[in-house]
Image (tube, grey):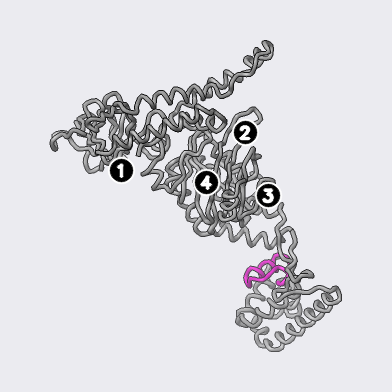
Amino acid sequence: MNTAGEQNAKQAFLSLQNLEKIYPNGEKAVYNFNLDIEKNEFLVIVGPSGCGKTTTLRMVAGLEDISSGDIFLEGELLNYKPCKDRRMAIVFQSYALYPQMKVFDNIAFPLTINRYEAPVTDECLQSCFLLRSLMRETDAQKLFEILCGILGGKGGARAKAESLAEVFSLTYECAKRLIALCKKYKKQSAQQLLSQKEQIFAEWEAQLGAWESAERGALQQKGIHVDEKFCELDENGAVKMQMRKLTPYEIKVKVYETADKLDLTPYLDKLPKELSGGQMQRVALGRAIVKNVPIFLMDEPLSNLDAKLRLTMRSEIVKLHNRIHATTIYVTHDQTEAMTMASRIVVMSKGFVQQIGTPEVIYNDPANIFVARFIGSPSMNVFNAKFERASSRFRFGSLEIAAGKDFAQRCAEFYKRKEAELSAMLDNFDEAAHESMLKLLSVTGEYAEKRRKTAEKNSLWANLKRRVAKSPAQDRYAFEREVCARKLEEVRCRLDSDCELTLGIRPENLRIRMHGAGETEKNAVTVRPTVCELLGGEYNIHFDYNGMGMVGQVDAKNKISPQDEIDVLFPAEDVYVFDPITGDRIR
């Protein structure tokens, strides 16, 4: 990794540097993925099926090997760390719950199988300190009433110790010692204990002092030193750490805390088959949250839910993210989820990152035709129009749209840059040029043709014929070089002449009114709707013009039916212009 990359990795919370994934058959699923993710950010990776978003997520999680590139978490290289040591939790598209386990056990499962780093603590000294604090800070009458209620109730010693620990916020070991202190008085009532308060507290203090004195003597003989928090220290004065499994009580505390955050407490004793889809999804989220890791990875977790529940869970996940202050990487093919949930969006297509930005930037300032079409519901209206340089206008059938005074100059500069880029690639066509052309094809939608030709070239029969004929291997860049040459020729033809460009306009930016309500303007057309979709507060008006299907949005107060004639205005300031050769936006 270069120096700049190393510097970014040290500064960013999670840094993905030049990630690539190549499968054994030579298929490349992810190309040169670079991204720095900030702490507490909600990042959404969005794209159509097969674009590489889930593969990228699995590489981050450690479930998929990285072909090349590096992953850093707070400056620490993760490439060779197993997934269990990466301090991440993943929620899959399927709930993946254990059907034979109750909700409690499903949430607790990660805690029962893993070991966690914890300081080596002297439990005896810590218990003595906590019990002294309990005697000093808790009202005596309340203390005795709770003790009599729990110790005189049903249940075994473990259940009673857990109850005391939960009520008084003690450790399990400390609760056991509290039971030992109360053994002498277990048959007395709270009022009887309260009348003997001074005597009882004096006896407890004497017993705590004896336990503490014996423990400190044992530590001294062993040469063990502890700090003010009763953590053991090594020879350098640093706190000793150990990897250990959590105790049943510690697991129970964590599970109940997590269930409370997700409103799952009433369902802890139920099996997954007794839950609804949303509840099962919350259990899957709880299993991730209970690990208390800094990063959550979510792979289309809402795709199995119905529309209303998906809407509810969407807001719940965002609220949960804000509440626990985690960093979340969320993968989805639903652009509505991406727009409503993300603090930043990564748009992918065919393994390439097309654009990274906030939802506002992605929607209002798309980098290319793929992003413009993919983001937005309904999708952007896209059509080809002829650009007339002399009048600086776009013409589409009878429709005329002003291009602006300086657009001709910007267009010429754009094509000069593209000519220089394509010419440089063609002169020295290497792996970088090959991938640049593949990205271009993924933007324009011509990738399918490339995949078909590659499949034919690499078929078993074709390889067998080459071996038999002992012919040299085909040039693996032949198709991309041919495309580059063709694109370069098309760009050169557009440098000084009128040309066809691709225009786009969002449905909400079309201005629709009843025909005859005003004078028809040059950048307006008169059409008859084909479909009028009522969505409550607005209509989606579908119509055909010059052989193209389009859609506009209008307030539902203006009732429109397929029997009406409407004027559709295309405001020039809301029109996006794209190059049909490369798919890039002409700004």
| Region rendered in magenta | 156-174
Calculate the distance from the C-alpha at mark 3 to the C-alpha at mark 4. 19 Å
The residue that disc 1 covers is 536
Mark earlier in primary sequence (2, 1): 2
Instruction: Give the mark, 3 or 4, whose residue is nearer the N terminus.
Output: 3
The kind of residue on which mark 3 rests is: Lys
Residue that carries the numbered disc 3 in the rendered image: 84
Q: CA distance from mark 2 to mark 3?
A: 24 Å
Specify the quadrant of the image occupied by residue 365: top left
Q: Nearer the viewer, mark 2 or mark 3?
A: 2
Residue under the image location 76 percent in, 70 percent down = 236
- Label 2 environment density (alpha carbons within 10 Å; few <14, some 14–19, many ≥20): some
Marks 2 and 1 sit apart, C-alpha to C-alpha, by 47 Å
Which badge, 4 or 2, is on the more N-terminal residue?
2
As helix, strand or loop, the secondary structure at mark 4 comes to strand
Image coordinates for residue 240, horizontal then vertical, percent: 75, 66
Helix, strand, or loop for circle 1?
A: loop
Q: Which residue is mark 4?
A: 330
Q: Which is more N-terminal, label 3 or label 1?
A: 3
